[in-house]
Amino acid sequence: MVRIIVTIKQVPETSNVKMDKETGTMIREGVVSVINPLDLYAIEAGIEIKELHGGHVTVCTMGPPSAAKALKEAIAMGCDEGVLVSDKKFAGADTWATSYTLGAAIKELGPFDLILAGERATDGDTGQVGPGLAAWLGLPLATYVSKICSLENNQLTVERLVEDGYQVLQLPMPALLTVVKEISNPRLPTLRGKKKARASQLRVLSARDLEVQESHLGLKGSPTKVVKIEYPKVTRGGKMVKASGEEGLHTAVSALFAFLAEKELI
Amino acid sequence: MSYVWTIAEQNKGRLREVSFELLCRGRKLADKMNTKLCSVLLGSNVADDILQELISRGADEVYFIDDPRLASFIVETHSNALSDLIKKYKPHTILAAATSSGRTMMPYVAIQVSTGLTADCTELDIEEGTNYLLQTRPAIGGNIMATIKTPDHSPQMATVRPKSSRPLPLDPTRRGKIVRLPLPDGLYDPRVREVGFRMSHEDSASIEEADIVVAGGKGMKKSDNFAMLRTMARHLGGVVGGTRDAVDRGWLTYPQQIGLSGKTISPKLYVAAGVSGSIQHLAGIKTSEYIVAINQDPEANIFQVADFGIVGNLFEVVPLINARLEAHNKGGK
């Protein structure tokens, strides 16, 4: 029986987003929210551990009340219960304050064996909350986990994807793993799962329910402050040549070589 | 004035290139504040003449915690060692690499020493008057650039994307202090152990560290066709990567995946063949210095971010490029 907590985040759906050709920036109107795609791998890994070893999967998110939708989706995939950590006081938290608050919420949930998290979220793209959470809770940590090789006698053996290969680590549970895509193939919710999700009651934790210092919460408790946001033009307006016909092909490739030589790339 | 620190990285007794890139960033910040630049290395068995290169490439001092228990990266012990150094020496600013170890250790250390951390910065500066570190980073898939600072907390900490700056030229006349330090008692955390290491097969060798990346997408049509991209990569001295589509179809392995659910890279040259340029893929390549795209569809998104685009059949264009590269490398034109 492995008691698993999966931490997730709701992010803007970007797969169908188009770029505005005039401004060269992303068109954000009509963007819906979804479970962070990398968290789906953590959810699936949690469910697979439960199926293999027996267990219980709690899915937990910090966010506005609307993040309940993400928790219900995770339950529809096969998680057993959902916890929404939500309070106006948590709003605007950076990774330091987010991991602090999530840590306090997890302490409130009672004993557990394993925390799984996506390696990073596709909106903030920091990958800092997982390691931060492990630091707050004093848990053994493995990041970029691509494979759980074994789980027995309270010991985990995992592979983590690093620059030149895979580092194999052994760590005692309870532990925290952040996972990458290679670890699993997320399943789709079943009809039965969706029914279960609709009927399930989410547990909601607010600041009052947690042992936290108010000065550590939300925007006010965040050490980092955003001072400026810019929407960069991503289009580069580079040179484009058409390679059609034998001659066009050679002209195009010659133009490419002139470009590469000019930029000292060859 | 307290120092600017950069965190060097080692692998089997050698320093990773990113150690020198960080020194280039750190040098500018230290000069602006009129303070010293110190490179910190946590590792084992690195010779003095190798450490000397940190001085020759911009550091005034090198602190090296030398202990066999730091030979491979284990976040708990490495973080304990760095946090201890921070508490003792109180640096003003710390820059680490946004690598698998930097992005694991620094958020852990940020909690241990109670300060902020900004991930994956592409620009750094010092604010006039306050001396706060101004940290600029892409977010939402590179569609916004946010500038962040950390007032009221110390040190100021950021991770920096590998390849986003070039090392300073080697200056062998530079002199500096190299300090070897032991790992203090009580900082080794025995809970997590490395029990093995599996090297990636050559093909997927470290696309984050490569100067040139040649990538293929759905337009490559099948696995065998990647041979021509491997040839191009070999001629250019680069490595092969690809889109999520290419990986999901089993044409490449996951370590080669570039984009939001794979790797974010900033090579000198990125060549995309048969890549349409989804928002997710572009997020992984936007900070490349030069982007070359080859695609049949003139409306493909990839052309919007390309510095040089060839609209055409890649199965004609790529072999011709390869033939020309081969001739070029043989000393022809």
Image (tube, coloured by chain):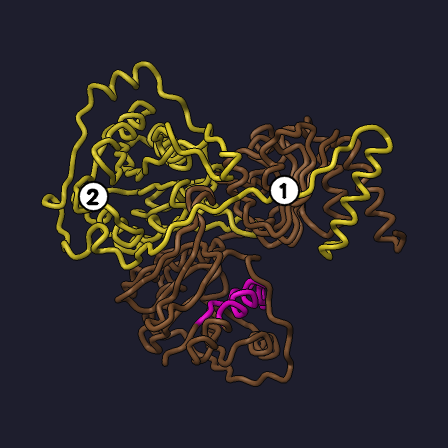
Chain colours: A yellow, B brown
Q: Tell me the residue that label 2 is attached to.
A: A111
Q: Is residue A52 above or below residue B60?
A: above
Is residue B25 a member of the stretch shown in magenta?
yes
Q: Amino acid at mark 2?
A: Pro
Dot 2 surroundings within 10 Å: few (below 14), some, or many (20 or more)?
Answer: few
- Answer left or right for A171 relative to B270: left
Residue at the far right: name it: B332
The kind of secondary structure element at disc 2 is loop
Which residue is depicted at the point 32% across and 38% down?
A: A9
Choose top left, top right, bottom left or bottom right for residue A206. Answer: top left
- Answer left or right for A162 relative to A178: right
Taking depth in this image into account, of B104 and B59 the one nearest to the observer is B59
Identify the mark at residue A60; answer none if there is no mark.
none
Q: Amino acid at mark 1?
A: Ala
| Residue B5 screen position, x and y as percent | 44, 72
Q: Nearer the viewer, mark 2 or mark 1?
A: 1
User: Does residue B228 appear in the picture of this structure?
Assistant: yes
Taking depth in this image into account, of A63 and A139 the one nearest to the observer is A63
Distance (Cα) linking label 2 and label 1: 52 Å
Q: Are marks 2 and 1 on the same chain?
A: no
Q: Quadrant of the N terminus of chain B?
A: bottom left
Taking depth in this image into account, of A44 and B241 the one nearest to the observer is B241
Q: Is residue B22 above or below residue A143?
A: below
The kind of secondary structure element at disc 1 is loop
Tell me where the magenta segment starts and ends, as one range: B5-26
Taking depth in this image into account, of B51 and A89 the one nearest to the observer is A89
Q: Tell me the residue that label 1 is attached to.
A: B306
User: Does residue A157 appear in the picture of this structure?
Assistant: no
